[in-house]
Image (spheres, rainbow, N blue to C red):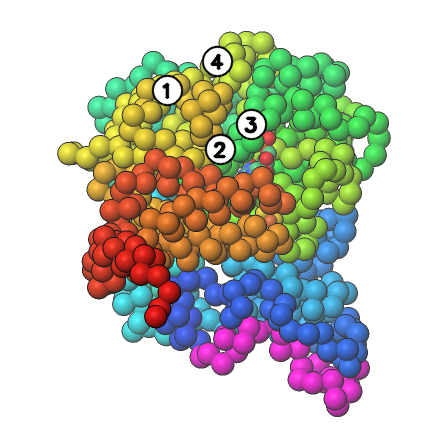
Amino acid sequence: MSAKSGQARPEDAGPPPAAVVPDAARSSPPSAWRRHGEQVPRFAHGSRVPGWDDAADLTKPPAVIPDPASTPVPDRLRESVTMAMAKYPDRRSAAIPALHAAQEEHGWCSPEAIEQVACVMQLTPAYLSSVATFYDMFANAPKPRHDVFVCTNISCSLRGADDFHGAMIAAAAQDPDVTVRAFECLGACDIAPMASVDGEYVGPLETADADQIVADLREGRPVLAGKQLRFRKCVDPGVAEPERAGAEHEPERAGVEQPGTSAVKILFHRIDEPGLNTLEVYEHRGGYDSLRKALKMSREDVLAQIMDSGLRGRGGAGFQMGKKASFLPEGEMAKYLVCNADESEPGAFKDRELMQKTPHTLIEGIAIASWAAEISTAFIYIRGEYSYQADILEAAIAEAYESGYIGQGILGSEHSFSLVLHRGAGAYICGEETGLLDSLEGKRGNPRLKPPFPALEGLYDGPTLINNVETLSTVPHIMRMGGAEYAKIGTETSTGTKLVSVSGDVRRPGNYEIELGAPAREIIYGLAGGPHEGREVKFWFPGGSSAPVLTGNDLDIAYDFDTLAKAGSMLGSGSVIVVDDSHSVLGVAMKLAKFYAHESCGKCVPCREGTNWTVKMLQRIESGEATPMDLDIMASVQEEIIGNCLCVLGDSMAMPVGSMIKKFRGELEAEIEAARERSGAGSLQDVVAVGVADEHAGPAG
Ligand SMILES: Cc1cc2nc3c(=O)[nH]c(=O)nc-3n(C[C@H](O)[C@H](O)[C@H](O)COP(=O)(O)O)c2cc1C
Ligand code: SF4
Ligand code: FES
């Protein structure tokens, strides 16, 4: 018997459950996290799955649940895990919260920590290891006390993140308590280049800040107090505020002319009002009146208002919310509402500002939607890195429960519903709705085959309505204004306003609320200030890193769902990343391809292999090994990915990379030639000459 777990373990059963520790990490001292920690750790075979290429050992006993009688569990951990399990219809859903608690208790997800969680949850350690190894925020090897996650994704790297990352590694080299990791987009591209220091978001960073961060951590002071995101005001010039406290934290926005197309403020109306995150201020502004109104109407009438508004999903696909809600079967049964707050696509950071500043708007939207779709169990799945916003939401949910906006018979009506905030643990794929559902069920976040669609078979196999934070936050406003009135804003097929996150090479990065159909030029130049002096827009992603790029010649098109689709791109989540003419297409393509290769869940071949192939082919260009034929091969790889994957993560890389090859082929060919010259591989003309000469030489002899 194993002393700790009480598991039956015959002598020949091999070593204790070492599979929870990756091979590379097991032999590495903690400091290796800093040395090799430039990328999020993965297993030697490149997968997130430990031992997936090892043959199964059939001599091992079947997995056993640790015996509570012989598995000591610290009281605090036991209590956290037990409380987490009580929140869900299925206890396994508590896997991620339980692992967060175990990591806090033990410093990392050690075999002992996993064994303890397995004991309390009555699951096998193998099950929990498989979950822990999927998510970037869980450490599967010992790590130093302080975490500095430096974002090196597109918007941050355009503004110097790679230099800062180097400086941060150098600064932390003297301190064994600090680990530095390059991280994918942290949802704060408005303060690029940025980092998350023990969960505190700071930026924009300069290389000189690196030493200060280490010093602040050492002294136990608030990290870079003047650069913390939590104090940042909204950059939108149309956001009127009763007070302007904390001016030292405000981004530059004085003197910005407000273009007419940004005049309507619905979601951002006085968003910076002090205390708006509290129920008191929210109610003072008429908060929850829309819920009162909705509860006096029939479900059908509420749904009709949402339909009439024409509101299209703000999370990426742009599907009409009312239509989606109407797909759910009617009648009493276990149905679920899930708010998608994963927001992990590079360039996206609007949901973060909404949740932080006006969490009750989201809760009210969820309450109304749950009434309309006859749902009594709701969840908000928030990305694990948004810990500050999650704390705010948790406090707001508690207030809403206390005041009868959530719970049994809300506001004296016949409608009852519960709401649970679920924190993720770092995996972009958990934003994909079915990957999110698996993750919420306590599994690895692997997408599911569709159909069946979640509206019929989703969470715990029940009908599920999944909507984005911004979509749901718009619902109270639709109820207040009336669906038809809301539909008058924007264009016929893209109604309403939209929060647009603008980042990259612009003077005033940030979130702006625009009327759909506004000219893109007005957003990029009018609101965000355009590129810096002397620079021009070279290309831009209209809808996050997954959108095919448009060029500086496309700035006069209308920013709405259909116009962008007609222009060969998409509006997506409304995240505009601007790249000016000082940056190379190759550098951006490389960042993008690496991101998708890292985030691919590995379930289907075109995505898993195609994203990695694309990285390798881009590396060939950089190293001087490529010829223009590589561009043709790379373009054909993208075509083979599109439409052939289980979910659209693969397409999300293939579409923008394909568009870059098409629109910037001349530049990429010049890069190939220049890199060949640099590496001594020889000019392409020589290669062609040699190739032709050989071909015409005929067989030897
Ligand atoms: C790889 C991938 C990541 C996604 N990430 C998000 C996300 O972070 N937030 C979100 O709301 N939707 C995301 N989506 C879209 C969701 O699958 C889904 O369409 C959306 O949550 C539906 O809400 P909506 O109709 O309100 O837009 C993602 C999709 C894919 C393929
Ligand atoms: S497309 Fe990529 S992320 Fe989506 S299921 Fe396939 S491998 Fe996983
Ligand atoms: S936070 Fe760095 S790219 Fe988004």
The residue tagged 2 is 573
- Residue type (three-letter) at the residue carrying disc 3: Gly
Residue 298 relative to residue 635: left or right: right
The residue tagged 4 is 491
Magenta region: 1-29
The answer to whether residue 558 is magenta is no
Percent across and percent down for residue 297 are 72, 15
- Residue type (three-letter) at the residue carrying disc 2: Ser
The residue tagged 1 is 557
Cα–Cα gap, marks 4 and 3: 14 Å
Q: Quadrant of residue 231?
A: top left
Cα–Cα gap, marks 2 and 3: 8 Å
Looking at the image, which residue is at 50% across and 75% down? 24
Mark 4: which secondary structure?
A: loop
Mark 3: which secondary structure?
A: loop
Percent across and percent down for residue 238 are 35, 21
Circle 2 crowding by C-alpha within 10 Å: few under 14, some 14–19, many from 20: many
Nearest to the eye among marks 1 and 2: give it: 1
Ligand 1: does it lie within 8 Å of the C-beta at label 1?
Answer: no
Q: Residue farthest to the right?
A: 332
Percent across and percent down for residue 73 are 68, 72
Indicate the quadrant containing the C terminus: top left, top right, bottom left or bottom right.
Answer: bottom left
| Tally of marks | 4
Ligand 1: does it lie within 8 Å of the C-beta at label 3?
Answer: yes
Indicate the quadrant containing the N terminus: top left, top right, bottom left or bottom right.
Answer: bottom right
Q: Quadrant of residue 578?
A: top left
User: Who comes first in sequence, dot 1 or dot 3?
Assistant: 3
The residue tagged 3 is 318
Cα–Cα gap, marks 1 and 2: 18 Å
Q: Residue farthest to the left?
A: 534
Residue 60 relative to residue 251: left or right: right
